[in-house]
Amino acid sequence: MGFEDLQHNFLTSRVEDLVRWARRASVWPATFGLACCAIEMMASGAADYDLARYGMEVFRNSPRQADLMIVAGRVSQKMAPVLRQVYDQMTEPKWVISMGVCASTGGLFNNYAIVQGVDQVIPVDVYAPGCPPSPETLMHAILTLHEQIRTGEILRRRETGQPTHLEHEGSPWTPEVPVAVRVGTPR
C-alpha cells in the first residue's frame, strides 16, 4: 500500500516534529527569582501580559516538574550551589533563560560575593538583557526559546558541544554562545 492509496484525511508527519511541537507548547518554568528582576517576571505572568497563551501559566515550585529555569536577578556565591542543585533536579530536556544584567554578567555588583554571570554555574540558552528587563523582553526571550526548541537548534548544539553557526565554517571549536535577545526596554 503506497501513499497514493491513502485517503485525504490521513495525517502524516515526522514524530520528531510532533515531539518538538509538544515541547514548545508546554514549557513549564521553574522560577529562580533573586532580586528586582523577579518582580518583572511575576508581572509577566499577570493578566496584563498573560503567559498562559504560551502554555506557561503555572510556575512550578518543584524542579522535578519543570523544564525551563528563569534565573532573575543577581546570584551570590552562596546561592550558586543551590542554583546548580535545582538545575540538576530538573527533567531533561531542560532550558535556561538568564533574565537581567545581574544574572547575565554580575551587573554593577563587580565584587567577590556575586557570580559574574550565571553561565559560570549552569548553561544558558537565551539571555534577556535589561536592568530590570520589562515583561515584554522576557516574553521575547521565551518566544526566542520556543523557536529554538521548534527547530531543534538547542539539542544539536548540546550534542556537538559547538554552536550551530560554526557548523559550516572550518574554524576551531569555540565555547558555546547562547542567543541574546536584542530588544530595547520600552519605558
Image (cartoon, rainbow, N blue to C red):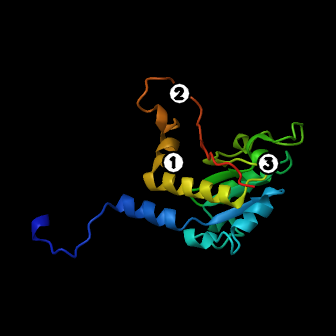
Of mark 3 and mark 2, the one earlier in the sequence is 3
Where is 5 relative to 165, above or below?
Answer: below
Three-letter residue code for mark 1: Ile
Q: How far apart are marks 3 and 1 (CA)?
A: 24 Å
The residue where tag 1 is placed is 154
Where is 129 relative to 24, above or below?
Answer: above
Where is 47 relative to 108, above or below?
Answer: below
The residue where tag 3 is placed is 80
> On the image, which quarter does residue 10 sit in?
bottom left
- Return the x and y of residue 121 as percentages of the image width and height: 72, 44
SS assignment at label 2: loop
- Return the x and y of residue 59 as percentages of the image width and height: 68, 69
Image quarter (top left, top right, bottom left or bottom right) of the N terminus: bottom left
Cβ–Cβ under 8 Å for marks 3 and 1? no
- Return the x and y of residue 22 as percentages of the image width and height: 46, 66
Of mark 3 and mark 1, the one earlier in the sequence is 3
* Closer-to-camera residue (55/14): 55
Of mark 2 and mark 1, the one earlier in the sequence is 1
* Closer-to-camera residue (85/6): 6
Image quarter (top left, top right, bottom left or bottom right) of the C terminus: bottom right
Three-letter residue code for mark 2: Trp
The residue where tag 2 is placed is 173
Packing grade of label 2 (10 A; few <14, some 14-19, many >=20) is few
SS assignment at label 1: helix
Which mark is in front, 3 or 1? 1
Q: Distance between the residues labelled 3 and 2?
A: 27 Å
